[in-house]
Image (spheres, rainbow, N blue to C red):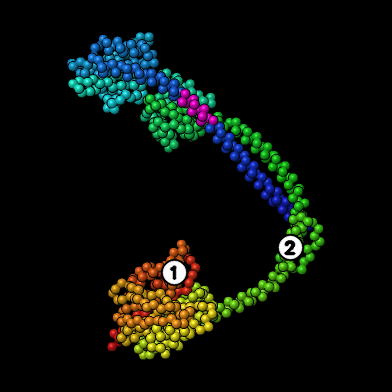
Amino acid sequence: MSTSAAPARRRGLAFKLSLLILTGTAVIFGAAFGYNYLFSRDQILREVEIDTRNLTLATVNRIETILHGVEKVPVYLAGTLGEEGSDRKVLLRRIQALLNANPEVFGSAVAFEPYAFDRKALYFAPYYCREGNSLKLTYIGSKTYQYFYWDWYQIPRELDRPVWSEPYFDEGAGNIIMSTYSVPFYRTQEGTRRFWGVVTADISLNWLVEMVSKITPYQSGYAFLISQSGVFVTHPDKNVIMRESIFSVAEAAGDQKLREIGRAMIKGREGFTALSSAFFGKKTWMYYAPLPSTGWSIGVVFPEEALFAGIGELSRVVLIIGTTGFVILFGIIILISGTITRPLRILTGKAAEIARGNLDVQMGEIRSRDEVGELSRSFDDMKSALKEYIANLAETTAAKERYESELKIAKTIQMSFLPKHFPPFPQNVEFDIYATLESAKEVGGDLYDFFLLDADHLFFSIGDVSGKGVPAALFMAAAKTLMKGTASRETTPSDVLAQVNRELCLENESMMFVTVFCGILNFRTGELLYSNAGHNPPLFLRRGQPPEWLSLPDGFFLGTMEEAVYETRQLLLAPGDTLLLYTDGVTEAMDAAKGFYGEERLIRLAAEGSLKPPEELVREVLGSVRAFAGSEPQSDDITLLALTFRGEAAKPS
């Protein structure tokens, strides 16, 4: 059974190695193939864009040349009408002469303001248009065709400049689809310039259709022309000319992109873009450019498949060649990888023996000097090192467990030094006190303490030792023990601090120090004596007033300067007043953004809880600090102590 399993593993490893190599090769080939395809595609598009732009702009220039020639006809005639008087025969001869000299103009009219040419005539607008090889005269003003209300007359009058009209069917005059170039003319009477009428030049759109239809890029491409409002002026599909606009087509097809292109075209912009609208039947590309004279726009459309037909054929040939090469390369790699992986299979069996715990397995003679031989020698070295490591690990684990056990014992001993039963003096209702300490490590350097000196006085203190860990915990224990022993002999807080400082300075080679605030409260009268050795000022919460920082005397921290001097200050507490003592682990707690909790946040929280009992106030502050820090690890010990003076009035009568 094991004999048949081994070849299966050999084929599997060789296959995986071959697959990995071929996959990498395929990725590289695919990247090169894709880059070549995209580069060729972009190159073709750039060339197509340049060619189409040149073709489009050449057509635009030809159209513009004709339109500029047309524009000169009414401009010249309007200039003469503004300078000379009105004579019917002269006017008609001039219109005829201009049409004979400009064969591209289909018709021309001079439309006067009502009663301007003849005070008795509401309409006067002679219009000459071509009819075969002659010119036909028509007077276009009538009740059914009040020309002065039409756009070709009203728009130049209101804008005070020449304009091209939208394409229209001129019923009643030319009777063809045309566009009109209208030029206003004026007369000066009694020093005032007044609008007098409009001179027009009409062009048939037949020549424009023929010129645009000759634009046939890439055989199956075509061109179209739209007016200023987007209406199709020319198009291979005659059913849409003057009946549809680019916007109605976009609306029917639900094509937002075609609608945006239509907006760009009527705004006179130029561009090259891809389209996939159902109106065009397939994915196409379009180049569009404006006709500056009329505000119209020409679009040249050609199918994408005509552009990239050559690239697609080349890609299929390359893909077939590449696939064939991959199959041949796969077979060669399978044969080569089998010879490479044979020594690895032997090494795998030895490694399995080591994994089962047999560290005495023999690796056999190592002859090869390639990477497999180096790997075999490394396994032999690893086997020896593993035996040594296991022996050392057992010894190290035992030592670590002893150390962790000792730390737990040290923490238990340290916490036993601190008062932790609340309420501590249930018989004394004249005051209420609560404190808590949370170490940043297994053991810490913060301390708090309180005890009765006699039947009327309470001693309380809070402190913070420099540093953390076991040294800080030992120094904290020494400071607390000295303070408790000294407080029972000395009469003022400053004397207590001075005596403890002298004791701590003796033999303090490590130069550790502790900051301390301590006080003695006469809970019968409310008199408070306090002193400070470099500690944070407590918050004084007067009943009914905003919190404030307690004013502290100067005092150097304990343990480094034997001759340091301390001062005692006096404060009279009223019933309901509270002192909140804390260490800098509160105000210097950090959140994930490395911002500090800060004194302002603490004083705002204290103001909200100034009337709460000490235990509730301490827990609220501690909860606020934890919420602020979130998942950020605690960086320093946190200690809080709250003391509320109740006074004699708190005793039951």
Residue 379 has which mark? 2
Disc 1 residue type?
Glu
Predominant secondary structure, magenta span: helix
Q: Which residue is mark 1?
A: 588
Image depth: mark 1 or mark 2 in front: 1
Residue 49 is inside the magenta segment:
yes
Residue 373 visible to an observer of this rendering: yes
Disc 2 residue type?
Phe
Task: Residue 339 in the image: state x and y as whole percent.
Answer: 77, 51
Task: Give the residues in magenta.
Answer: 47-58
Residue drawn at point x = 40 percent, y = 34 percent: 263
Which part of the image, by quadrant, shows the C terminus? bottom left
Whole-number angstrom distance, CA of label 1 to CA of label 2: 52 Å
Residue drawn at point x = 26 percent, y = 18 percent: 82
Residue drawn at point x = 40 percent, y = 72 percent: 621
Residue 449 visible to an observer of this rendering: no
Task: Residue 595 in the image: state x and y as whole percent.
Answer: 44, 64
In the rendered view, tell whether residue 13 sits above or below residue 196: below
- Give the mark, 1 or 2, whose residue is nearer the N terminus: 2
Q: Quadrant of residue 152?
A: top left
* Residue nearest the viewer, comparing 237 with 550: 550
Q: Quadrant of residue 8?
A: bottom right
Q: Tell which residue pokes out farthest to the front in this image.
A: 563
